Amino acid sequence: MPEALIEETKPSDRESSRLAALYSIGILDTPAEPAYDAITRLAADYFEADSAIIAFADETRVWVKSHCGEALRELPRANSIFDMVLTADGPLVIADIRRHPQFQRQKVHLRTQNVVFIAATPVHADGSIVGMLTILRRQSRDVLQENELRTLQNLATMVSSQLELHKLRTDSKRQRTRPSRTASEVPASPSWPRNSDLRRAIDRREFVLHYQPVVELKSLRIVGLEALIRWQHPERGLLSPVDFIPVAEDCGLILPIGDWGLAEACNQIQAWTRENPENGSLRVCVNLSARQFSREGLTDHVESLLQQSGTSSHQLGLEMTESSLIPNMNTATEVLEGLRALGVAISMDDFGTGYSSLSYLHSFPIDVLKIDRSFVGRMTDGDHPLQIVRTIIELARVLGMDVVAEGIETSEQYQLLHQMGCRFGQGYLFARPMPAEQVNTLLQLPGRVLPHSHTLQQNAVAYMA
Ligand code: C2E
Ligand code: MG
Ligand code: MG
């Protein structure tokens, strides 16, 4: 351990900006996030540690926000591990604390019994260190390998992401509660479509599915498709799901619309497989809304649809967002397990945007994480979104899940994701959502591999759009 790591921390500008960040982020009144518990649990599991701790610090104290394993209470800040992390301005790994000079001089406060191995890495907010993620073991072990250290840092980045989300939530809540100044600033409530419009559209079969390819980033091979619904309105033209799905959800018509979508997707899978048996390896994913998900007998319904259309379960995937799962976690787990037992793949859509994205990952049987396109879109804007994406990829790797990055629009995003080990992607760079007939053309490409020139062409189109 280099001596420099254990020098006393001097009061500095860095310290005052650290404290400013700590207060501005409102950490002092943050409710205990289940996400922190998920992170400490993950860290303890991954490193086979006796305990893992997320702690924050103010001028005088280090307080434990979440722990897995032995509980640590509040500690004095002076000469704490946190101070050592601050001084190191980076991760700190001590293979055997008993041989550590600072420990021998009785300076490090460790209120836990018999700890031998310590690895701690800073948690940042607004560019300053505000806390740390620490793992503790009673037995010594080798210093961390490079990939292990990266995992620890990635988990600490997830804590930072939760802090940032908390800040965003607080800010947006503040904005929402601000009274509007004039009546004209209040947006008119959208009166279209009404329930009767949707009902008529169902009767007149005006809904259509478009499909967007999902590609393996290494080979540009099409491995699957996401089914995305549109409303082919006789006067208004082709309408986006965001214009009618929320209304359909509210009035319950999402159930017949969703049933139609699932059946249509299964029939399309069959048609593509008939055309070319090799298309049997494609997985077509259908989006499920919260109401569809919480419907009684969903698993039986999916099973009978698969049987009726003669579709094999591994050809179908279901995408849902965390808001569908969170309200009733126990039922959600049961339903997901039922679907999984059928052999249907489950994707967590828009991952990273939810409140407690991390807390359920352990308990839910999920096969695929889809990184929300807002992160992919901001990846080249700065370190933080990039770190979040990196962390999600790493987390998925640890949990044995596949990752699909959504909304890839530029070659730069593609290269970065590929380098970071993301296996799959979808976005305008490769192909926009398109009618089934146009997909046929792409499926006829040798090996279903998109040529690079196609990708570049799509890229140009994406920029022009
Ligand atoms: P989603 O499931 O996250 O779908 C991805 C959305 O991103 C799609 O929007 C897709 O067109 C768009 N997208 C794909 N690549 C790019 C890109 O490179 N750049 C940009 N800017 N956008 C890209 P879309 O089709 O408008 O669908 C919006 C949402 O509507 C979907 O989000 C999904 O939540 C919902 N949805 C779509 N079809 C269905 C359905 O059949 N049932 C239900 N319940 N919801 C659906
Ligand atoms: Mg989706
Ligand atoms: Mg999505």
Image: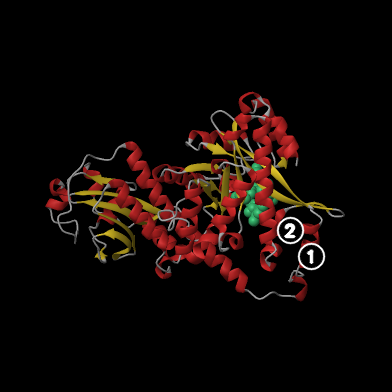
The residue carrying mark 1 has its beta carbon less than 8 Å from ligand 1: no
Residue at 50% over, 42% down: 403
* Front position in the image: 140 or 448: 448
- Counting labels gives 2
Residue at 69% over, 74% down: 180
Kindly indicate the quadrant of the structure image that contains residue 353.
bottom right
Residue 152 visible in the shown view: yes
Quickly name the residue at label 1: 192
Helix, strand or loop under label 1: loop
Q: In the picture provided, is 395 more to the left or to the right than 449?
A: left
Residue type, label 1:
Trp
* Colouring used for the render: secondary structure
Q: Quadrant of the C terminus?
A: top right
Q: In the picture provided, is 444 more to the left or to the right than 10?
A: right
In the image, residue 165 above or below residue 281: below
* Front position in the image: 376 or 372: 372
* Front position in the image: 328 or 14: 328
